[in-house]
Amino acid sequence: MRAIELITDEIPPLMHTDTGEKALNWMEEFKVSHLPVLKSGNFVGVISETDILDKMELEKTLDELFQHLPRPYSLASDHIYQVLSRIAEAKLTVIPILDDKEVYMGCTTVQHLMSLIANTGSIKENGGILVLEMAGSDYSMAQIGQIVESNDAKILSSYIMSSTDSTNIEVTLKINKIELDRIIRTFERYDYIIKASFQKSSFNDDLQFRYDALMNYLNL
């Protein structure tokens, strides 16, 4: 999915002639902490709620309040992962999307992105989740996939998390089976560390535990 497909019409840009007060009102209305600013149709930069609150004269225009604004943005051709990376890097709630000539096309929000991601791919598919921990040098998706498929299951999606202070990585797997016990035992035979699992059996056990605890409380 490309950035141009992520644009939402719900968030309008501010004009450079708008006041700080209007900017704050719009941020409150649209439940965001950032908004793009245009001047004569051209992208000027992104204004943040914090920057505006640092100013005392909110009746002044954005032009009067700020000489320069940061210009984080994504290109229309960027992949959704690049858009997410840019948002995280700049700590934004809204990111402008420009074409290859840096003409403003629209913007998207963190909330909109999360909604799109949640409704695409395998996130809504039934299945269990398995988190493996291993040294980065030991990572092999071919072997991981072989282990899962040897148990008549398939990987619906996966992602890797790494840390700057460790050589280990975490591999999170979404698997099309709700019962993961056999798959877990196979991974353990191959000396994989199972950091976490989320499956039907553990959910039911937890639900039963909470029910029993409630019944014991009511019987006091």
Image (spheres, grey):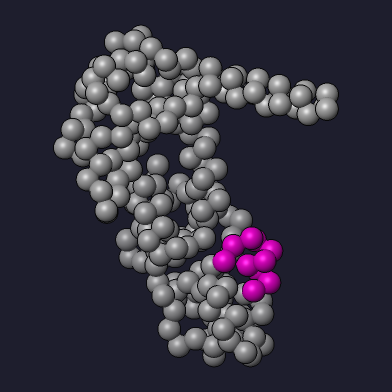
Residue 169 occupies which quadrant of the picture? top left
Direction front: furthest residue: 220
Q: Residue furthest right?
A: 219
The quarter of the rendered structure image containing the C terminus is: top right
The N terminus appears in which quarter of the rendering?
A: top left
Write the residue at 48% across / 72% down.
Answer: 46
Q: Which residues are magenta?
A: 24-33
Looking at the image, is 196 positioned above or below residue 77? above
**Residue at 43 percent of width and 17 percent of height:** 180
Foreground residue among 79 and 181: 181
Chief secondary structure of the magenta portion: helix
Residue 199 percent location from the top left of the image: 50, 22
Based on the picture, tell me whether residue 32 belongs to the magenta stretch: yes
Q: Position of residue 161 (x, y in %)?
A: 33, 43
Q: Between residues 189 and 30, which one lies in front from this camera angle? A: 189
**Can residue 27 be seen in the rendering of this structure?**
yes
Q: Is residue 213 magenta?
A: no
* On screen, residue 39 above or below 131: below
Q: Is 130 on the left or on the right of 166, as rendered? A: right
Furthest residue to the left? Answer: 137
Q: Is residue 72 above or below residue 161?
A: below
Q: Residue at x 51, y 45 (%)?
A: 114
* Residue 153 appears in the figure: no
Number of marks drawn:
0
- In the rendering, at what x and y percent does residue 206 appear? 60, 24
201 to 163, vertically: above or below: above
178 left or right of 156 in image: right
